[in-house]
Amino acid sequence: MILKQRVERVYLLFFICRRRYFRVRSHKQTIVGIKCRVKHRVKDTTLCFAFALPPSFTFYLHNTVYNPAVDNKDNFNSIYGLPPNISFPNPYTFGVMNTFEDPITSGPSNTSAPLGKAQGFYLLNSFNEYTLFHVFTANITEGDYKGTIAIFGQVREVDPVRYLTVIGGTGAFPGARGLAKNRLIDIDHAPPAKWTMSFELDLYY
């Protein structure tokens, strides 16, 4: 009898249509879920299922640039696209684009726990200094939180701390907005050149 009642409750949970999404926000975290009001014979029962959305998230991006001297697909994860030939000086490589599919990890080492991949591009877009316009998605497939985070914005290469904008998310980061603090952690100029960057995200929903 008890087992039958439990099965009935599970059935009602998934098939009753009177649902309402809810959201509770505190200074520490945001909680979202679904309220289901179930009519069951004598009385109504409200069932609540909720999960906490991460208010912050940190990952490390590992970029290795293609170099003709090390022409092996296993040795790089990004490629530069050059602008058309131009007749005037271009000291800040205006128009150069880098397309990447970089591994991201939970720590600064290449051997840290993998989280997924960052896929997108950045474009050098100034004649007067090195500035980089970023558009990419962090596709988180491992760890406690899984989903995507969309990151967008322009930074100056000389700044030790750079700030980008979080403009969206899916999965464990639904509709995320916020700030992405970016730092260069390590760089190795030996071909193929590679560097590691951190991204510390402050998120709201």
Image: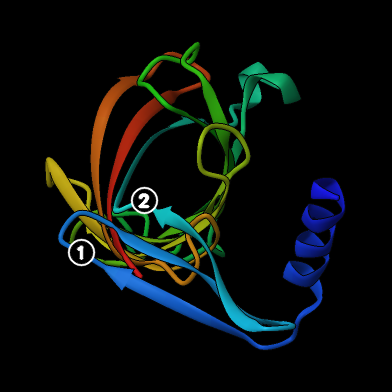
Q: Position of residue 71 (x, y in %)?
A: 71, 22
Which residue occupies 77% across, 53% down? Answer: 6
Which residue occupies 20% across, 64% down? Answer: 26
Q: Position of residue 137 (x, y in %)?
A: 53, 56
Q: Position of residue 105 (x, y in %)?
A: 47, 27
Residue type beneath disc 1: Ser
Disc 2, SS: loop
Q: Quadrant of residue 101?
A: top right
Mark 1 highlights which residue? 26
Name the image colouring: rainbow
Spatial CA span between label 2 and label 1:
12 Å
Asked if residue 78 lies left or right of residue 191, the reply is right
Q: How many marks?
A: 2
Q: Quadrant of the C terminus?
A: bottom left
Which residue occupies 33% across, 33% down? Answer: 197
Which residue occupies 58% across, 76% down? Answer: 45
Q: In the rendered structure, which disc, 2 or 1, sits on the residue that comes first in sequence?
A: 1
Residue type beneath disc 2: Pro
Residue 54, which numbered label?
Answer: 2
Disc 1, SS: loop
Q: Position of residue 68 (x, y in %)?
A: 64, 26
Residue 3, which numbered label?
Answer: none
Q: Is residue 72 visible?
A: no
187 vs 116: above or below: above
104 vs 177: above or below: above
Asked if residue 189 lies left or right of residue 8, the reply is left
65 vs 101: above or below: above
Callouts 2 and 1 close, C-beta under 8 Å: no
Is 12 or 137 nearer to us in this picture?
12
Is 196 or 35 nearer to us in this picture?
35
Asked if residue 80 lies left or right of residue 125, the reply is right
